[in-house]
């Protein structure tokens, strides 16, 4: 739907270069908005941070959040990035108030701040991404995961970025946040009943429900048999049908602390893929 009004920024003033705390404050101040989805822009900002980073290929170092090439075609028009213009536009007033920050740093910092403000773990974040000019080489479409596919595809995509099986399951826990939109991905609905709180609920719902195909005109997705209010993508259910993935799903469903710890490390790594010359941690 249309964007709800953008609230005034907390600091409301320009900051000195390098004052990332001022940027963090302004990001925090725009997250909660009545009338947009479940009341928070947090989830779509997390998705922006993920999609700007998840194009990375460790073989040749291409892709990743450095450059912020999603500002330009064709990347902004990839089907996988449908709906992320909402997130990018939302951050424009913050870029205007803090013009010294790069888009790559702003988009990834917004994802980290959103996770933290929604109750998640502290995400180690470092500045250093440099924006690329329009016309720069953009990686080919097709590097972000396809929700209709299974375990082999998840491994192909995430191993290409340099992640292992445990990282794949930990990162998938971000689907505790937000929802699917028919006008963006074609899928519909939230994974949990608390989509603006970062928790291990996604894993609990995965293991505690019976998942059946949803009867509708849209693409194959699953609904929980009891309430029919929650959804899983085919790629989510792949985490249950693969023995290795399933082991971590059950571990994270039981142990939120382990999930938070592993997610923070993997998400931080994701945001830094392909970013050269980062300052020491
Ligand atoms: Fe995701 N995700 N995601 N996802 N995702 C969608 C929404 C969110 C896949 C497909 C989809 C990660 C991994 C995967 C978020 C974070 C992460 C949607 C619905 C699809 C489809 C988009 C829409 O309609 O708006 C697939 C396939 C994978 C395979 O691994 C990872 C990793 C992360 C972050 C660490 C978040 C957050 C959302 C909610 C966005 C919103 O607007 O509410």
Image: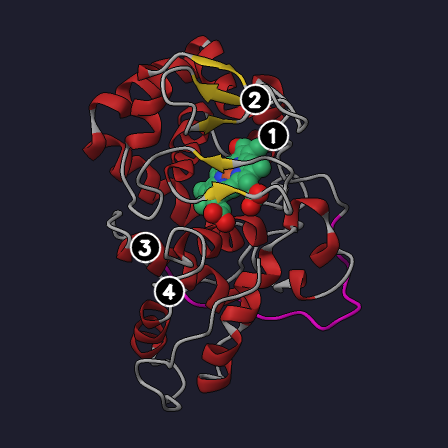
Viewer-proximal residue, 153 or 84? Answer: 84
Instruction: Answer whether labels 1 and 2 touch (C-beta < 8 Å).
Output: yes
Q: Is residue 115 magenta?
A: no
- Quick check: can you spot residue 161? no
**Which residue lies under the disc numbered 2?**
234
Query: What residue is shown at x 50% (from left), y 84% (from top)?
Result: 96
Viewer-proximal residue, 165 or 249? Answer: 249
Quarter occupied by the N terminus: bottom right
Q: Say whether disc 4 or disc 3 marks the residue closer to the N-terminus.
A: 4
Q: Which residues are magenta?
A: 123-139
The dot on residue 33 is 4
Which image quarter: residue 211? Answer: top left
The dot on residue 147 is 1
**Neighbourhood count class around disc 2 (C-alpha, 10 Å): few under 14, some 14–19, many 20 upward:** some
**Percent of width and height locating residue 84:** 59, 56
Q: Say whether disc 1 or disc 4 marks the residue closer to the N-terminus.
A: 4
**Percent of width and height locating residue 42:** 39, 56
The dot on residue 113 is none
Q: Is residue 127 magenta?
A: yes
Q: Say whether disc 3 or disc 1 marks the residue closer to the N-terminus.
A: 3
**Neighbourhood count class around disc 3 (C-alpha, 10 Å): few under 14, some 14–19, many 20 upward:** some
Label 4, label 3: how far apart the Cα atoms are: 26 Å
Label 4, label 2: how far apart the Cα atoms are: 30 Å
């Amino acid at each position: 739907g249309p964007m709800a009004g953008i609230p005034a920024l907390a600091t409301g003033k320009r900051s000195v270069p390098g004052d990332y705390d001022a940027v963090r404050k302004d990001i925090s101040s725009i997250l909660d908005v009545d009338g947009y989805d479940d009341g928070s822009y947090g989830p779509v900002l997390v998705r922006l941070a993920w999609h700007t980073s998840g194009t990375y290929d460790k073989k040749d170092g291409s892709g990743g959040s450095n450059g912020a090439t999603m500002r330009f075609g064709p990347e902004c028009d990839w089907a996988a990035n449908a709906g992320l213009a909402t997130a990018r536009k939302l951050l424009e007033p913050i870029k205007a108030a803090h013009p010294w920050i790069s888009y790559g740093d702003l988009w990834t910092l917004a994802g980290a701040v959103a996770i933290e403000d929604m109750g998640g773990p502290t995400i180690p974040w470092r500045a250093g991404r440099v924006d690329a000019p329009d016309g720069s080489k953009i990686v080919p479409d097709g590097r972000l995961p396809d929700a209709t596919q299974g375990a082999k595809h998840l491994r192909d995509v995430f191993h290409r970025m340099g992640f292992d099986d445990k990282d794949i399951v930990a990162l998938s826990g971000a689907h505790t946040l937000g929802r699917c939109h028919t006008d963006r991905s074609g899928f519909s609905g939230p994974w949990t009943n608390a989509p603006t709180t970062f928790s291990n609920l996604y894993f609990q719902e995965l293991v505690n429900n019976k998942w059946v195909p949803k009867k509708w005109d849209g693409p194959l997705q699953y609904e929980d048999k009891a309430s029919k209010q929650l959804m899983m993508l085919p790629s989510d259910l792949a985490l249950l049908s693969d023995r290795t993935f399933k082991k971590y799903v059950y571990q994270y469903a039981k142990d939120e602390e382990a999930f938070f710890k592993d997610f923070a490390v993997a998400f931080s790594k994701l945001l830094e893929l392909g970013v050269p010359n980062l300052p020491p941690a």
